[in-house]
Image (tube, rainbow, N blue to C red):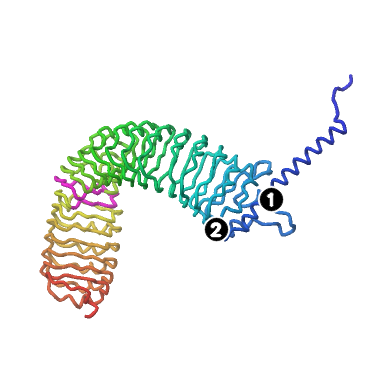
Amino acid sequence: MASSRTYPTPLMSFFYLCLIILFLSTSSQSLSSETEALLKWKATLQNYSVSALRSWKLTSSSSAPIPCCNWFGITCNKARSSVIEISLPEVELQGTLDNFTFSSFPNLLCLNLSGNGLTGPIPVHIGSLSKLILLDLSNNYLSSVLPPLSNLSSLHFLDLYGNEISGKIPLEIGNMKNLVELAIASNKFTVPTEIRDLKNLIYLELSFNNLSGPIPHSLSNLIRLESLYLHSNQLSGPIPSEIGDMKNQIDLELSQNNLSGPIPHSLSTLTRLEFLYLDLNQLSGPMPSKIGDMKNLIDLELSENNLSGPIPHSLSNLTRLEFLSLNSNQLSGAIPQDFGSQASIVEFQLCNNLLSGSLPQQICQGRSLQRLVVQNNKLTGPIPDFRNCTTLMRVRLEKNLLVGNITDSFGVYPHLYYIDMSHIRLYGELSPNWEKGKNLSVLKISGNNISGKIPPEIGQLTRLGLLDLSFNKLAGEIPKELGSLSTLFHLNLSGNHISGHVPIEIGNLINLELLDLSANMLTRSILTQLRQCSKLLSFELEFIEWKHSISNW
């Protein structure tokens, strides 16, 4: 039986050969064109990391270029026929993009030149990168206006953060339907309403621009949006209630603007929200009563507004809450007593309000509390048992009407660096355990009813810079061990019942700037001890003050 297999004719063989030659020629030309474009741009750079771009050169054995697919920061397709990624973040590039031939990279998918020193405008020819998916030019010094980007229809990620680009974002941005992330913060942009058409947007970063006027209601059209950053602008007017329609929100940051009016109750419906920053505005009225419905909230920042009324009881429902900051408002009434039992709470900041009643006695139950800041309120009642709060780092209870035994209510705090319990109603004696707080730099317990002696163990707090035990009922002598506090710059023991001589070791406090031992029962043989304290600006002894005169002794 005869075979049915056919063989190519000479004409067909010639045709196939031409196709192969054409393909190889096109690939070679493409690669050569891309290599040439990269070398040309490198030659115009004023500076770059030599180690990073060492591979960007011709071979030593021939005049042919090394295939740029092998160069640092360059990725080619599988066929090694075209560049698909240029990634050169933080390699000290200095220069412009004027001589970057964008048209030489028709298959480029990713361009990342972030964290360098590039200057000048973004060339209009960047629009020739029609296949580009990621463009990251963040943290450079690019300026002028943004060119039209309508041809970049494949773009998913656009990051221009931290440049000096100004003017209005081109209206064509509304045509970039595939855009998922838009980060253009820290520039000088104004934003067109067409941004509402970016229905696939998940991440929108517009902070640190010169945005003014109201927040556009049309932003609620971005129903897939998870992160919205509008902080640090000059936005004014109320927060649109329509923001409550953006159900996918996880991070909403509107702080440091001039926003006014109440916090919309609709925000309570954002049950996926984890981070809510509304601080440093002019918001007024009460906190939303159903704020506790935001079950996933981790960080709630409402400080420095004009909020009034009570703290809602529903706040106790936020079992994931780690950071709560309501400082500097006009909040009043009692703190919900079941708040603080959350194991997650790390920062509890309510200072400079009109709050009354007692601190939640369960505040340390979670054993994760690091910052407790409630000064300048009208809090009364007993201070909680802080002995289990071993994670504390910063504590401010001053200027309240709290009552407690300092001997029994405090334990050992290895991470504590700042504590101020001045002008409340503490009594008892200072424990030697305070010396175990090796990171303590500020210890202020003035204006209380503390008695007994100053523990000499305090002299082992090698990082202590400020010690204020003034206006208590301390007695005995000044421990000579205080002379070991080499970092101390402020020492105030005034208004006690301390007696005896000032230890000669006090002269070892070479960084001391302020010393107040007045209103005690000390002898006056002190001038000799202080000769070495060359930084001392003032000291007071028995209501007599010397300033700037120690160098003459």
Quadrant of the drawing holding the C terminus: bottom left
**Mark before the other along the chain sequence, 1 or 2:** 1
Question: Which residue sits furthest right?
Answer: 2
- The residue positioned 25% from the left and 40% from the top of the image is 284
Residue 187 placement, left or right of 490: right
Q: Identify residue for label 1.
A: 67
Magenta-span inclusion, residue 394: yes
Image position, residue 318 (x, y; %): 30, 36
Could you say where residue 155 lies in the image, as x and y percent from the top left?
A: 54, 39
Mark 1 residue element? loop
Q: Is residue 408 above or below residue 12?
A: below
Residue behind mark 2: 94
Specify start and end residues of the magenta stretch as a single range.
372-398
381 relative to 531 in the view: left or right: left
**The one of 209 and 413 positioned closer to us in this rendering:** 209
Q: Is 454 situated above or below 289?
A: below
**Residue 341: image tag:** none
Residue 71 in view: yes
